[in-house]
Image (cartoon, grey):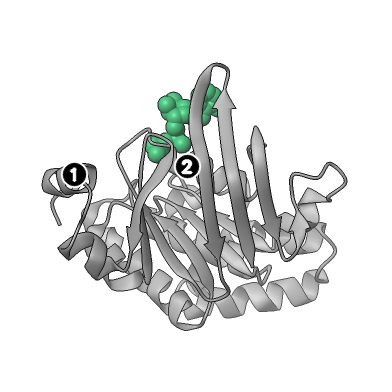
């Protein structure tokens, strides 16, 4: 589905991503771990072209997204993104946050979008909050709304950038449970997370990044129980599960 070849990203003189190669297949559940500043967010942002790679290719369903003629808005409909800080529109109600993109992009009529949004809100037990504004929601509720906002576009893949890092501990579970449900439904997912118990349970493939490179990858059992590189061993010894 996505093939990343020899990807580099520089910010000025700083080389943030160096020679990244990664193939993402339909249905993959990939987790990316690694120390702060190693380039995890930049990699996700290069996959959906929120950052334009300095060099290399991102091929999505056969189309090279680095090609200047590609209509990125069309591509991004197919790639959902969920951010640490939720990125909900504070001046819009919960339901309007969810229906905005499908209506604006002409994918659904207002009526159809409202119906679909209500169905999604019901599935996360937040239908009664549909007319509230994001400020009146808890962090966990905001993130669950942000997740269904990406689901309404029926993306082929969803990228999650530390979706639980801004949450109080008691709210982490409601978000990771929703993510596991979406994974079980077959969604292709790439998740940057420090929530190691979730990563261990969710990920079929775990990538360990350091200093702009993927330096080790494997099953969660490989990565957590049989780490090979010194750097991964050090990283794991510093984090608590
Ligand atoms: N827009 C930007 N301009 C300049 N430097 C950036 C920008 N975005 C990220 N960086 C730098 O790139 C490095 C990697 O950042 P990031 O991808 O956010 O790391 P991570 O998500 O792994 O913590 C950091 O040193 C960060 O300061
Ligand atoms: Mg980050």
User: Does the image show residue 132?
Assistant: no
Label 1 CB sits under 8 Å from any ligand 1 atom: no
Location of residue 11 by image quarter: top right
Residue in view at x 53 percent, y 75 percent: 187
Secondary structure type for disc 1: helix
**Horizontal and vertical percent position of residue 23:** 55, 62
Point out the image quarter for the N terminus. bottom right
Residue furthest to the top: 13
Query: Which of marks 2 and 1 precedes in the sequence?
Result: 2
Determine the CA span between mark 1 and mark 2.
Answer: 23 Å
Q: Residues within 10 Å of mark 2 (few under 14, many from 20)?
A: some
Residue in view at x 37 percent, y 72 percent: 204
Secondary structure type for disc 2: helix
**Horizontal and vertical percent position of residue 111:** 78, 75
Q: Residues within 10 Å of mark 1 (few under 14, many from 20)?
A: few
* Residue holding disc 1: 230
* Residue holding disc 2: 41
**Horizontal and vertical percent position of residue 183:** 45, 76
């Amino acid at each position: 589905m996505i093939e990343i070849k020899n990807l580099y990203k520089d910010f000025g003189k700083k080389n943030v991503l160096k020679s990244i190669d990664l193939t993402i297949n339909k249905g993959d559940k990939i987790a990316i771990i690694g120390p702060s500043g190693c380039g995890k967010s930049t990699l996700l942002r290069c996959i959906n072209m929120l950052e334009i790679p300095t060099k290399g290719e991102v091929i999505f369903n056969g189309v090279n997204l680095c090609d200047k003629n590609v209509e990125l808005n069309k591509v991004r409909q197919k790639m959902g993104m969920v951010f640490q800080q939720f990125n909900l529109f504070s001046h819009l109600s919960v339901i309007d946050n969810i229906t905005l993109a499908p209506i604006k992009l002409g994918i659904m009529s207002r009526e159809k979008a409202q119906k679909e949004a209500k169905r999604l809100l019901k599935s996360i037990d937040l239908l009664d909050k549909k007319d509230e504004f994001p400020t009146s929601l808890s962090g966990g509720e905001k993130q669950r709304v942000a997740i269904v906002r990406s689901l309404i576009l029926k993306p082929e893949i969803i990228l999650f950038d530390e979706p639980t890092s801004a949450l109080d501990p008691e709210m982490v579970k409601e978000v990771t449970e929703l993510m596991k449900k979406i994974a079980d439904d077959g969604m292709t997912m790439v998740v940057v997370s420090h929530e190691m118990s979730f990563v261990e349970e969710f990920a079929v493939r775990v990538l360990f990044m350091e200093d702009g490179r993927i330096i080790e990858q494997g099953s969660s059992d490989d990565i957590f129980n049989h780490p090979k590189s010194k750097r991964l061993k050090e990283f794991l010894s510093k984090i608590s599960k």
